[in-house]
Image: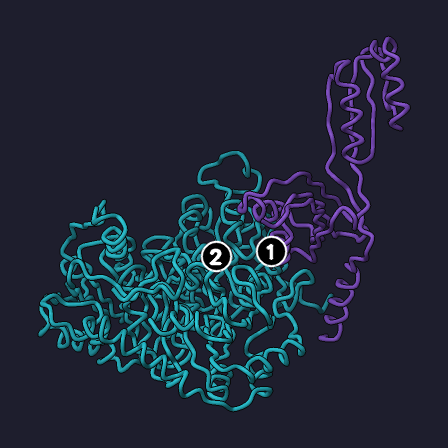
Amino acid sequence: MEKKILYTVSIYTENNIGLLNRISAIFLKRHINIESFTTSECEIENVFRFIIVVEMTESGIEKVIKQIEKQVDVIKAFYHTDEETIFQETALYKVKSNSLFEERHIQNSIKESNARIITVNPKFFVIEKTGFRHETDKLYNDLAPYGLLQFTRSGRIAVTKSKMGISEIINKFKNQKKKKK
Amino acid sequence: MNKMKKRKKISGAEAVIKSLLKENVDLVYGYPGGAIMPVYDEFFKFQHKVHHVLTRHEQGAVHAAQGYARSSGRVGVAIATSGPGATNLVTGIADAQIDSTPIVCITGQVPAHLLGSDAFQETDIIGISMPVTKWSYQITKASEIPDVIAKAFYIAKSGRPGPVLIDITKNAQFEMFDFKYKKCVGIRSYNPIPKIDKNKILEAANLINSAKKPLIVWGQGVILGNAEKEFKSFVEKSGIPAAWTILGASALPTSHELNVGMVGMHGNYGPNILTNKCDLLIAIGMRFDDRVTGDTSKYAKQAKIIHLEIDPAEIDKNIKVDVPVIGNCKDSLRMLSKNIKTKSYKNWLKTFDDLMKKEFNKVIKNDLIPKKKGLTMGESIMAINKFTKGKAIIVSDVGQHQMVACRYANFIESKSNITSGGLGTMGFALPAAIGAKMGAPKREVVAVIGDGGYQMTIQELGTIFQLQLPVKIVILNNDFLGMVRQWQQLFFDKRYASTEMVNPDFVSIAKAYFLDSERVEVRSDLEPAVERMIKSKKPYVLEICVEKEGNVFPMIPSGAAVSDVRLD
């Protein structure tokens, strides 16, 4: 059996509302669980970037990428391994305020993990930690015994070590259009 | 005073028609309803320019649009209202998606301010149709109409064709705006015709030049790419035997000496067996559907495989290939032909002949020259061949009769075989035949339909009558859902669960629609009846009562290897 590993999928798209559905359907249809999903406008105006993390075989991800690129509004799609990307995710932890003052461990954990307190009020405080999954997990495990009021984690955001060349694709299209005129 | 004449504002609905005219659309199929009424009002005003055909069900409209697209090579258009009108299109859209048929569907939608309120006849047709459209868009402002329609036609037709759906809210149909139309010539995120890699052409040519037992399997890509001529010269120069998938049928005449028949589940014996004997398989414009490959782990394992394909997503999807040639096969075939040697494969071709003889003795003879009393589907198709001289477009439905029609129909011209391949949509043929005839009015169109599928869209007889459209309809009636019954016989110990049909009098039904009709029950009546039907200048319904429990062979049981094809 081919080994499954984590892939970071980057998809550059036009700004089209329906596209999210089309992309998620490609995974859904093949029973592929999406581990994380984020989207935002990228470095090019009006071009959006989806970052999706999935655990798959390489032959599987190759096919999925082709199906994604086949969508009319997708400019280009890529897949990368963890080694090929620089990635982070952010977690927020909401804890009762009295724990912060009563439990020294909490303060130590925050310091050790390079986390940040972003809000404090008489009832609760909120800790933010940005890092790898195992780091946000560790802080979760450290804080959980003292009672977490809420916990949430963002999807992965990532940039790749190699170039993606989206502007080149867009410029090439512009030039072709000019030529035609 | 300003000399420039101020452009007259027009409504979104009028813009829809004007945009269609800009795309050279003069024929659409549809069904009116509340949310699309402004557009219908314009159809009334523009009836001298656009012929709107009222079908009897929206499914009929979309299948007719498909039939039109398949026989004419143009984009078919289907129109429906919101809600049920739109959802009734979905089967046809899915069919067009899987069979790469260029159609544009336009649906009405509730006014934008009511979207999401569960308004009367509101349905999320964009969401529903998304997995089965090549592209879709919901228009909420009139100003979007020209650009979106231009884009829709471009996307539907270019590259690997497919269905596009445009949903237009009612307020956008009423809204007045300045109309300006510009044809779409490109979209930056969409590369419909990938550039051919010359190295791949050379690699492929080398494999072809050194092959001892090569086999071509071609699909609908040859027809969609208008590459029939290039394909024929490639086949003739290379001397390689060529077999077809069901949708590839008719791209090369049936009688061509290098045409060795159909591959797949009910394909010919030779090409199926020899798929697992050839040393080189050249797949052209086909997608290795499971009905073609059987068990993929036992498919052409001994062979090198070249795949000429326009859609990069098809490369290595089902079958891993050695040399992918991505691009339009019209160009890649031309390039390949330049780089290959003129060859012939006498001994290799003889193995096809020998296997064909075996198939003839075990299967074909009994189908076409039966000794038994009951009429066979095969001899019915032969009678059609005889009187159409192979010049007709055969539109088939889904099931046993479809396999028989594709196996035995004699095709001379391309675009002569219109059938629902990938989706297997029963009920496709009758409405598709309407479109096929209107897309190719000079050609004879014969719809071959089983008694099951016929009753799924039988209401379109009304459309045929209203149009006085001279399509010829042949019902091969065995009072069974024959293909399912065959499987029940072979794989479920003859437990015929819900496959026997107690049928109405099809001749009376046709006559109630004022159509000429007759029934054939004995062999001696078959040819004269088919002759009368073909000679008629009017629509005609011919019911042929065939043997009840006839089976279609050869057959690759599902999940078996192509070389395990059975003759009985």
- Chain letter tied to cyan: B
B9 vs A92, left or right, is: left
| Frontmost residue, B194 versus B470 | B194
Q: Quadrant of residue B475?
A: bottom left
Q: CA distance from mark 1 to mark 2?
A: 29 Å
| Residue drawn at 36 percent across, 65 percent down | B419
Q: In the image, residue A59 lies at what x, y percent? A: 61, 55
| Residue drawn at 45 percent across, 73 percent down | B217
**Circle 2 sits on which residue?**
B105
B317 vs B382, left or right, is: right
- Label 1: how many Cα within 10 Å (few below 14, some 14–19, many 20+): some
Which quarter of the image is occupied by the C terminus of chain A? bottom right
Q: In the image, residue B330 lies at what x, y percent? A: 55, 78
Taking B415 as reference, is B564 above or below it? above
A128 vs B466, left or right, is: right
Q: In the image, residue B47 lies at what x, y percent? A: 42, 65
Dot 2 amino acid type:
Cys
| Residue drawn at 31 percent across, 80 percent down | B354
Q: In the image, residue A44 lies at what x, y percent? A: 80, 53
* Parent chain of label 1: A
Query: Residue lying furthest bottom in this view?
Result: B342
Task: Let me know if residue B519 appears in the view.
Answer: yes
- Chain letter tied to purple: A
Task: Let me know if residue B96 appears in the view.
Answer: no
Q: Which mark is residue A63?
A: 1
Q: Which mark is residue B383?
A: none
**Residue contact at pointers 1 and 2, CB within 8 angstroms:** no
Dot 1 amino acid type:
Lys
Q: Quadrant of residue B92?
A: bottom left
**Secondary structure beneath disc 2?**
strand
